[in-house]
Amino acid sequence: MPRDIQSITDEIEERDGIYLGRWRRPVNSAIHIVGSIHDDSMASKLGFRGGTVAGSIHFELFPPLMLRAFGPRWFERGSLSVYFLDPTVDREEVRAVVAVPPAGDENVQVEAWAERPDGRRIGEGTAAAGDPAVPSALMSRDVSKYPPGELRILANASAGDRFPEVPVEVTPAVLESRLRVTTDPLPWYEGDSPWGAGLATPCHVVDLMRAAGDAYLRTVQQAAAVPLYGAIEVRNVNGPVFAGWPYRSGGAIVSLGQSPKTEYLWYDAYLDDTDGKRIAEMRMMYRFMKASSSLYQ
């Protein structure tokens, strides 16, 4: 590894069979979006402590630990799979934690989570490299276990619905904006990576793959409702994902359901290059707050 990357991984503490990330204070970079779950006023009305930090932002805590646990190959063929448990607010202190993988195992999966200083987990799941023999945290969940019942917000959506493909790209301006606030900037995000071009941050990888799903959901929602992430898994299939490169994103709904406070859906998404080669995949859970919709007033 280049020395600057080596110094980053050297900072990762190993203790009792786990790697501990540094304590960070993620910025709620969408706090200005009025009426969103990241807006303090709206989030408070819906029962949260304040505007929430997007789960995809917490994914940026993990790359230094992925490098320590798996090396650069994680960006080529590795995954991070997290079910979110408890939202955080702007600049609340958190850290990432990953179990130390067995030495010499090229196809391995370990436990991964993010936590507050009091030990409460804000999300938990798995991290992996290669082709583990067991499914990831999210792929092992039975997401169709319960019938959806009578949906209102998502009444026009159905399992199996496919999202029309859309062109996507991390532009230089978008990358620069993200790097100003990311908790763990890697020099590889700005170029001179082992693969030549600069890498997209985990937050941007999620954004690229949710683009088609977001576009589709805007066409089927019966009424406006505030969404938030319930779970995210990103899988590098033939990575890395590069900033500034053109891709195409699409996907399909896996299942729908509801809880007392939300309607939700699970969907799978993908990222292909312009030649149709599969670069990355994602499983996403979206929740829509019932209390934010006129259909539940």
Image (cartoon, grey):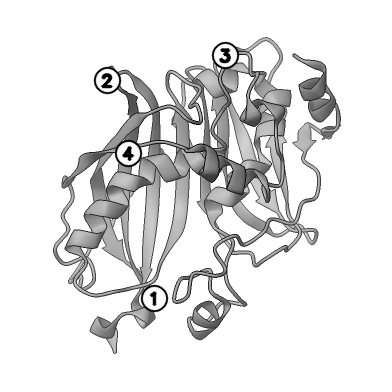
Q: Which mark is residue 269?
A: 4
Q: Nearer the viewer, mark 2 or mark 4?
A: 2
The Cα–Cα distance between marks 1 and 3, rounded to whole angstroms, is 45 Å
- Label 2 amino acid? Gly
| Mark sitting earlier along the chain (4/1) | 1
- Which residue position is annotated with label 1? 261
- Which residue position is annotated with label 3? 195
Choose top left, top right, bottom left or bottom right for residue 116: bottom right
Tag count: 4
Residue 5, how many percent across, how many down?
76, 23
- Label 3 amino acid? Trp
Q: As drawn, is 168 to the left or to the right of 178?
A: left
Element at label 2: loop
- Label 4 amino acid? Ala
Q: As drawn, is 246 to the left or to the right of 65?
A: left
| Mark sitting earlier along the chain (2/1) | 1
Check the image and report above or below for 252 versus 242: below
x 59%, y 61%: residue: 53
Q: Are marks 1 and 3 in contact (CB under 8 Å)?
A: no
Residue 281, how many percent across, how many down?
38, 32
Element at label 3: loop
Q: Nearer the viewer, mark 2 or mark 1?
A: 2
Q: In which quarter of the image is the C terminus?
A: bottom left
